[in-house]
Image (cartoon, helix red, strand yellow):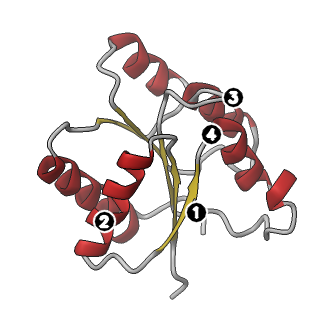
Amino acid sequence: MKNKTILVVEDNPQDEMLMLRALRKANVANRIEIVRDGQQALDYLFCEGEFAGRDPKDLPAVVALDIGLPRLSGLEVLERLRAEPRTAVLPVVILTSSDEERDRLKSYQNGANSFVRKPVAFAEFAETVVRLGFYWLATNDPPID
């Protein structure tokens, strides 16, 4: 079985570190790719720019996407993903500190598979990340391989 990749789109170094720490602590062995802004996420997924040599068939199993990103917002990234046939059904989890109702609504309107608020406490944040990882990597049956 192919090792499924998690793409984390996160501009906050502390949240990135906490996510990686939580996944390692839970023995999640999947490859984790990190990009730090919206444009870099699109470049990774569409194999452009610094990722031009990446295999376009190697899509991640799930994208953990923050909303408040530099260059392009997470919502703009999500819109672009859903507009492209190759990424239209790629599982995307919005993982954000936003508690704005409009962000949640817009995320689902743009095709997010899930909207999760980042808990403030590390223990809760770690548990949330681990649950998301296990669900999207082990439980969920994705529409694409």
Q: Secondary structure at mark 3?
A: loop
In front of the other: 111 or 43: 43
Residue 15 to residue 135: above or below: above
User: On the image, numbered disc 4 is attached to which residue?
Assistant: 37
Measure how far apart labels 4 and 2 are at the Cα level.
21 Å
Q: Quadrant of residue 105?
A: top left
Measure how far apart labels 4 and 3 are at the Cα level.
6 Å
User: On the image, numbered disc 1 is attached to which residue?
Assistant: 60
Measure how far apart labels 2 and 3 are at the Cα level.
27 Å
User: On the image, numbered disc 2 is attached to which residue?
Assistant: 21
Q: Secondary structure at mark 4?
A: loop
Residue 71: numbered disc? 3
x 73%, y 34%: residue: 83
Q: Residues within 10 Å of mark 4 (few under 14, many from 20)?
A: many
Asked whether disc 4 touches disc 3, contact meaning CB atoms under 8 Å apart, the reply is yes
Q: Is residue 3 visible?
A: yes
Which of pointers 4 and 1 indicates the residue nearer the eye?
A: 4
In front of the other: 82 or 18: 18
Asked whether disc 1 touches disc 2, contact meaning CB atoms under 8 Å apart, the reply is no
Residue 20 to residue 89: above or below: below
- Which circle's residue, 1 or 3, is located before the other in the chain? 1
